[in-house]
Amino acid sequence: MNKDLILKKIGDWNQGFSYPLYIAGPCSVETPEQLDQTVDHLVQQGIRTIRAGVWKPRTRPNSFEGVGAIALPWIQEVKEKHGVKFAIEVASPAHVEEALKAGIDVIWIGARSTVNPFTVQDIADSLKGVDIPVLIKNPINPDLALWIGAIERIAQAGITNIGAIHRGFSNFNDTKYRNSPTWQIPIELKSLFPDLPLLCDPSHICGNRDLIPHIAQKALDLSFDGLIIESHVNPDKAWSDGAQQLTPSDLGGLLHQLKTRKVALDDPELQSQLDIIREQIDDVDREILELLSQRMSLVEKVGQYKKLNNVAILQMERWNKVFQTRPEWAKALNLKESFAKDLFKLIHTESIKKQTEVMEGK
């Protein structure tokens, strides 16, 4: 898998911005006029690959679900007029057939489809023998295996130009973002598939255009290969998701403000200094693991004591004390309390597993 060739095939990004790849366009195709005006303004900002919703799978019925296949001739006209590529979402073999017939350049599989292996397999089967870039969004739920499974199904259909899109995950507890970024999941995907192009969709993560710059920059800081952002010529009058769409001019301003980071240092002296710091980090990490090993040995002793005395594994009073005090200790050490809470949830879960093994004589 050649990442640069795949990105080139998806976006022709050398005609607009240099790497990273930027894709932009309206959440939904609404009318021929709205599409033409939006694309015209996006081209002026250097965008060469347009995203647009034709079929819009929605969470609840009676919401606007796209104008459907009647938008495809409009897209064909705009493609020819402005010399751009088009990417649209497909959710069924019928969508794939119509998209291919209309000369769509890139298709993507949405989060509601990725979550269902049957749907992905149906789409994969309909793509056999076809040469078209396919982008795969993460599933709605934070499930890396489902995401990987969807990628594998499309690859097994013979598609070689595959990319992934991180659009965030549903989370009832997140009051800031429409979909929680949960960055560790796309980072894990990058580590498992380093040659797989990975784009970020800050529009669907944020749900609010004011939050998009932060998430977009964060993605580039994490070495994402590009961004796919919703843009509408008049967002406040958009038929769907207006709050998370930028005007083309605002989008252009954002893209010129974003900073791309070097993957490696060019200066040998600076690289040497960085290597020394990393060696120190490695030493600290070993110490952390040694301490965790000692803690688990003590947990095992606690488990043995509970087993001998017929005491329940889970002691809520003890857990509440741990969960209260560790964030306080972290704060005193200039660490985030939320980080300490997440860390000790993991440690506590592993401790319960260890004590369960003791109880069961494993």
Image: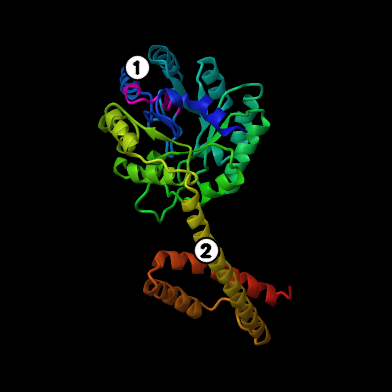
For the point 34% across and 30% down, the residue is 231
Q: Which residue is mark 1?
A: 32
Choose the circle earlier in sequence order: 2 or 1.
1
* Depth check, front residue: 306 or 189: 189
Report whether 312 appears left or right of 202. right
Rate crowding at label 2 as few (under 14), some (14 to 19) or many (20 or more) other CA atoms within 10 Å.
few
**Label 2 vs label 1, nearer the camera:** 2
Q: Which residue is mark 2?
A: 281
Residue 230 location, x and y as percent? 37, 33
Q: Secondary structure at mark 1?
A: helix
The quarter of the picture where residue 37 lies is top left
Q: Secondary structure at mark 2?
A: helix
For the point 34% across and 18% down, the residue is 36
Residue type highlighted by circle 1 = Pro
Instruction: Mark yes or no: residue 62 visible.
Output: no
Residue 152 location, x and y as percent? 64, 38
Residues rendered magenta in the picture: 43-55
* Depth check, front residue: 288 or 143: 288
The dominant secondary structure in magenta is loop
For the point 51% across and 16% down, the residue is 103
Q: Quadrant of the C terminus?
A: bottom right
Does 124 sit above or below residue 187?
A: above
The single residue placed furthest to the bottom in the displayed view is 309
Q: Quadrant of the N terminus?
A: top right
Instruction: Mark yes or no: residue 356 visible.
Output: yes
